[in-house]
Image (tube, grey):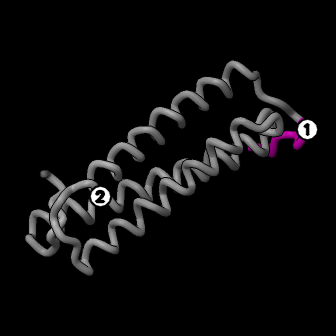
Amino acid sequence: MPEPDPEQKIDSTFRNGSLTATGIILGFSLNFINRWVSNPNDWSRIDILPLAFLLLGIGIQVKVFSDLLSRDSLLIANYDRAKRLFMLGLLAVAIGMGIALVSDFLGLGRMHFLG
């Protein structure tokens, strides 16, 4: 498959749909971490690992959201980069949630994922 021309642009309505989806998933991620850290239970060392993945993933998602708001995001190369970064951020959040869930099921941490 040939590489797209670096100056080739995507339609702004296509980018707007991606921006909306990114914003919704970012909002979900922020809501999740807010509810998880607001839990009144004590923290343990094992809770640092999922927290690190969650913060990393959310940080990447915020960066992508900022990149998609830029006018340069209409360039295909920039849009594709933002899309790859977003998937990386989404994966990091999913790994963080998975670690938190497994540690909760195994009783390793004091922060309960399921409430």
User: 112 or 39, which lies in front?
Assistant: 39
Disc marking residue 7: 1
Task: Residue 95: give x, y in percent of width and height.
Answer: 35, 61
Relative depth, front residue between 115 and 82: 115
Q: State the SS at label 2.
A: helix
Identity of the residue drawn at 24% across and 63% down: 100
Q: Amino acid at mark 1?
A: Glu
Most frequent secondary structure within the magenta stretch: loop
* Direction top: furthest residue: 13
Asked if the stretch drawn in magenta spans residue 5, the answer is yes
Q: Residue at the spot x=48%, y=42% of the render?
A: 26
Region rendered in magenta: 1-7
> Which of the 4 quarters of the picture holds residue 106?
bottom left
Q: Is residue 10 above or below residue 50?
A: above
Q: Is residue 28 left or right of residue 77?
A: left
Quarter-of-image position of residue 93: bottom left
24 vs 87: above or below: above
Q: Which residue is mark 2?
A: 37
Would you call the spot at circle 2 few (<14 residues within 10 Å), some (14-19), or many (20 or more)?
some
Q: Residue at x 77, y 28 (%)?
A: 10
